[in-house]
Image (cartoon, rainbow, N blue to C red):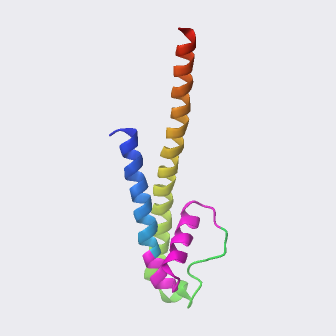
Amino acid sequence: ASEINLIFVVTFLSSLTITGGAAAFSRYEGWSYFDSVYYCFITLTTIGFGDMVALQKDNALENKPEYVVFALIFILFGLAIVAASLNLLVLRFVTMNTEDERRDEAEALQ
């Protein structure tokens, strides 16, 4: 697979992870869907402002073990997927600059 196709696949997986996670957090936390998307993006990109925190409502740690397991798995796999996506995007930009520099050097030598 080409690098561009790989970037599209991983970006699609990132979007799917964020939107799917947002649906679950919206249901369990009672947040709006937009707030849940915001929470998932902020959490998975490790920005973490702390303005929204999951598992704090209704003693979720004690009363909703399935939600705790979901949150842990979501964060672990979501971090891996989003990190891979960001890594590929950065790699693509770095390679573009390197290719431009090589082309400029080759043109200068001619």
Q: Where is residue 18 in the image (x, y as percent from the top left)?
A: 46, 66
Q: Main secondary structure of the magenta part?
A: helix
| Residue ID at (53%, 15%) | 107
Residue furthest to the left in view is 1
Q: Position of residue 78 (x, y in %)?
A: 47, 62
Could you say which is closer to the camera, residue 20 or residue 4?
Answer: 4
Could you say which is closer to the camera, residue 53 or residue 63?
Answer: 53
Quarter location, residue 21: bottom left
Quarter of the figure with the N terminus? top left
| Residue ID at (56%, 91%) | 58
Residue 46: say if magenta: yes
Residue 5 in the figure: left or right of residue 21:
left
Q: In this view, does 96 lie above or below 50?
A: above
Residue 74 in the figure: left or right of residue 48:
left
| Residue ID at (51%, 82%) | 32
Q: Position of residue 54 (x, y in %)?
A: 57, 78
The span picked out in magenta is 23-48
Residue 99: say if magenta: no
Q: Is residue 82 above or below residue 103?
A: below
Q: In this view, does 34 lie above or below 81?
A: below
| Residue ID at (51%, 33%) | 95
Q: How many marks?
A: 0
